[in-house]
Image: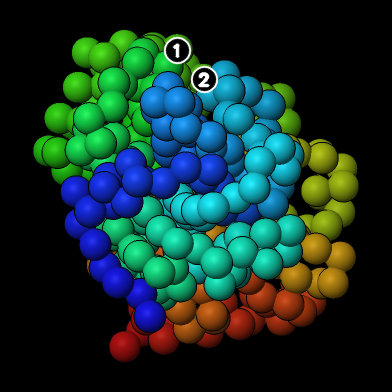
Amino acid sequence: MTTKIEVNQAAELLLAKDNILVLCHKNPDGDTLGSAAALCHVMKNMGKTIAAICHHSIPAKYDYLDIPLYNEEFEVEYVVSVDVAGVNLLGENLAHYAHKVDLCIDHHESNNGYSNYLCLKEDYPAAAQLMYEIIVAMGCEITPHVADCLYTGLITDTGCFKYSSTTPLTHIVGARLMELGAQHTMLVEKFFMSKTAKAVKLEKFMLNNLEYHFDDRCALLALTREVMQDIKPEPTDIDGLSSMPRNFEGVDVSILIRPLREDGSYKLSIRTGETVNANEIAAALGGGGHIRAAGCEVIGSIDSVKKAILKEVENVLCR
Ligand SMILES: [Mn+2]
């Protein structure tokens, strides 16, 4: 049984607890990490014991968040998940927490209610926007560093305030975080203005290998195991790739397929324009996410995976 709660109740719960473990989602992004880091830092500043944990190691790009990582130095009394839509997104290393999450702080409409308490704002573009409100409701000071952590979540999940999920409130929170010391220029430069050599190689591969389907309304890129072996990209090198073809003229659906594990599984990222619901396509294959950005995992050969996703895209585009 999951009880839905508001921001004030989430703040009260957190204030009453100590020895807290914060769970991030696997393949961590700026939102899950920035939100978790912000919560850890404000609670630590209050004298509480808190640390975060993630199935994957934290990409070096996020070192500046200075996330206190859990290494069993205290007995966990309260478990909070941040930006985690479902227990399958915790990853195998955290799977044993699946039924032990006390509070989930999230913004995914696909959240299936796995925690005791759920503070969910599906109309927020980033969990960081919700985390900001919870921290304000807790009456905690937002230091410049905490502002950086929250700003990271805000800009990475909104494509730097570009995605349609961005609202006036998102800008108000962003503005407030800048006032509180968030380093706008440094963070935007880090996440949006610079590209690694491997990311450029991937982009070149994409331009040469993009497939078009359904009167060019769907663009699909498959990163084969061979090209991944050849380029050896970091997960952060691939992040920008999924949404790029969505911006090409006439494209309503953009699909990125990348190899996941050696068992023949692939991760699919789906990005859509205004007329198509990405979450609907992902859900048909057991995944989920948001209306413009969603994902799923499929096992099979690259050809069978392509066939499966294209069938679902066709169902949505051609009805
Ligand atoms: Mn998020």
Front residue of 135 and 246 = 135
Residue shown at the point (19%, 48%) measured from the top left: 8
Label 2 CA crowd tier, 10 Å (few <14, some 14–19, many 20+): some
| Quadrant (top left, top right, bottom left, bottom right) of the C terminus | bottom left
Q: Position of residue 1 (x, y in %)?
A: 38, 80
| Camera-side residue of 128 and 22 | 22
Q: How many marks?
A: 2
Question: What amino acid is found at the position of numbered circle 2 in the picture?
Answer: Lys
Which residue is the site of mark 1? 186
User: Residue placed at 68% from the left, 26% from the top?
Assistant: 60
Q: Which residue is mark 2?
A: 190
Indicate the secondary structure of the residue bearing disc 1: helix
Find numbered disc 2 in the image and state the secondary structure of the residue it sits on. Answer: helix
Q: Which mark is residue 310?
A: none
Answer whether labels 2 and 1 touch (C-beta < 8 Å).
Answer: yes
Quadrant of the rendered image containing residue 168: top left
- Position of residue 95 measured from the top left corner of the image (x, y, whole percent): 67, 66
